Image (cartoon, rainbow, N blue to C red):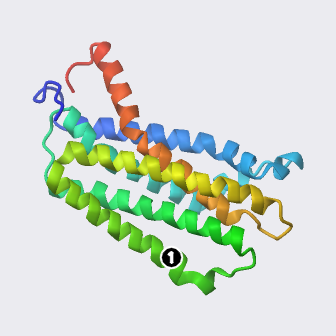
C-alpha cells in the first residue's frame, strides 16, 4: 500500500482528487464525442451535416454523467491508498459493482456487434434474453470474481486487476466492434451500423475508464513536484 504523508493534508483530499480526475475524464469524453461520431459515420460529414444535436439529447448527458460517476468510484480506492487513507471492505463494493457493470456493457456491445453483422434484419425483441440477459450475467459474474479477488489480495491488488481486465476487455471488444461496423456501414439498410457503433462507444469509454488511475497519478506527482504538500 503506497502512502505519502498519510496524516497530512485535508481529511477529504481523496474526494477532491477523485472529483478532479473524474472531471478530466468527462471533459475528454465530451471532446471525443464529435470526432468519434464523424469517424464512424463519415457520410454525414461528406454531406456537410455535423450532428451537433447530440449535445442537446438528455440520454447523452445521462451517459456522460454515469461514466463520470463510474470513474470517480473506480478512482476512489487508488486515490485513498495513495494519500494514505484507510479503505474498508465495504468501501470496495461500489467500484466492484461499477467494474462488473462496465464489463457487462462490453459483453453487450460485442454481442450486438456480432448480431448486426451476422443477422442484419434481426429484431432486438427476438433475442432480448440473449443480448440483455448475457450482459447481466456477465455483470454478476465479474462482480463476484472481483469480490473474491478483494478478499484474497487486498485493495491495491484489486484496483490493479480491475483496470487490467477493463483494458483487456475493451481492446478485445473493439477488435470485434470496429471491423463489424465497417462491414455493416457498407450495407444499404436503414440505421446500419447503429449497434456496432454502440459497441465502439462502449469499448472506447471503458478503455478511458481503465486509464483513470494513471491520470490521477500523473496529476498527483506533478502537484507534489510543485510543492503541493502531502495530500
Asked if residue 50 lies left or right of residue 167, the reply is right
Q: How far from the left and from the top, in percent, is residue 225?
A: 30, 14
Rendered position, 2 above or below 103: above
Q: Can residue 72 be seen in this view?
A: no
- Rendered location of residue 37, percent (x, y): 70, 50
Give the residue at x 45% y 56%. 66
Quadrant assignment for the N terminus: top left
Can you see residue 7? yes
Q: Closest to the observer: 64 or 122?
A: 122
Above or below 228: residue 213 = below
Residue 209, image x, y percentages: 44, 46
Q: Where is residue 44 in the image (x, y as percent from the top left)?
A: 83, 52
Q: In which quarter of the image is residue 84?
A: top left
Residue depicted at 30% across the width and 37% down the height:
16
Q: In the rendered image, which residue does mark 1 sit on? A: 132
Secondary structure state at the residue bearing disc 1: helix
Q: Would you call the spot at circle 1 few (<14 residues within 10 Å), some (14-19), or many (20 or more)?
A: some
Q: Residue furthest bottom?
A: 126
Please give left or right for residue 121 compared with residue 130 in the image. Answer: right
Figure quadrant of residue 120? bottom right
Q: Is residue 163 left or right of residue 133?
A: left
Residue found farthest to the top: 226
Amino acid at each position: 500500500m503506497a502512502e505519502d504523508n498519510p496524516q497530512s493534508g485535508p481529511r477529504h483530499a481523496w474526494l477532491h482528487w477523485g472529483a478532479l480526475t473524474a472531471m478530466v475524464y468527462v471533459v475528454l469524453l465530451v471532446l471525443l464525442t464529435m470526432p468519434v461520431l464523424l469517424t464512424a459515420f463519415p457520410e454525414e460529414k461528406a454531406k456537410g451535416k455535423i450532428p451537433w444535436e447530440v449535445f442537446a439529447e438528455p440520454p447523452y448527458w445521462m451517459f456522460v454523467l454515469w461514466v463520470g460517476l463510474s470513474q470517480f468510484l473506480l478512482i476512489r480506492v487508488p486515490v485513498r491508498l495513495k494519500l494514505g487513507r484507510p479503505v474498508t471492505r465495504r468501501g470496495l463494493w461500489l467500484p466492484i459493482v461499477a467494474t462488473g457493470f462496465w464489463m457487462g456493457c462490453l459483453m453487450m456491445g460485442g454481442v450486438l456487434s456480432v448480431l448486426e453483422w451476422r443477422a442484419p434484419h434481426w429484431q432486438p425483441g427476438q433475442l432480448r434474453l440473449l443480448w440483455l440477459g448475457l450482459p447481466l450475467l456477465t455483470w454478476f459474474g465479474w462482480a463476484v470474481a472481483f469480490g473474491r479477488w478483494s478478499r484474497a489480495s487486498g485493495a491495491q491488488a484489486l484496483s490493479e486487476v480491475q483496470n487490467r481486465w477493463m483494458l483487456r476487455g475493451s481492446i478485445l471488444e473493439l477488435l470485434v466492434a470496429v471491423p463489424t461496423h465497417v462491414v455493416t456501414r457498407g450495407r444499404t439498410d436503414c440505421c446500419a451500423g447503429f449497434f456496432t457503433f454502440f459497441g465502439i462507444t462502449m469499448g472506447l469509454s471503458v478503455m478511458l475508464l481503465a486509464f483513470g488511475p494513471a491520470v490521477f497519478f500523473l496529476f498527483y506527482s506533478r502537484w507534489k513536484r510543485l510543492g503541493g504538500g502531502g495530500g
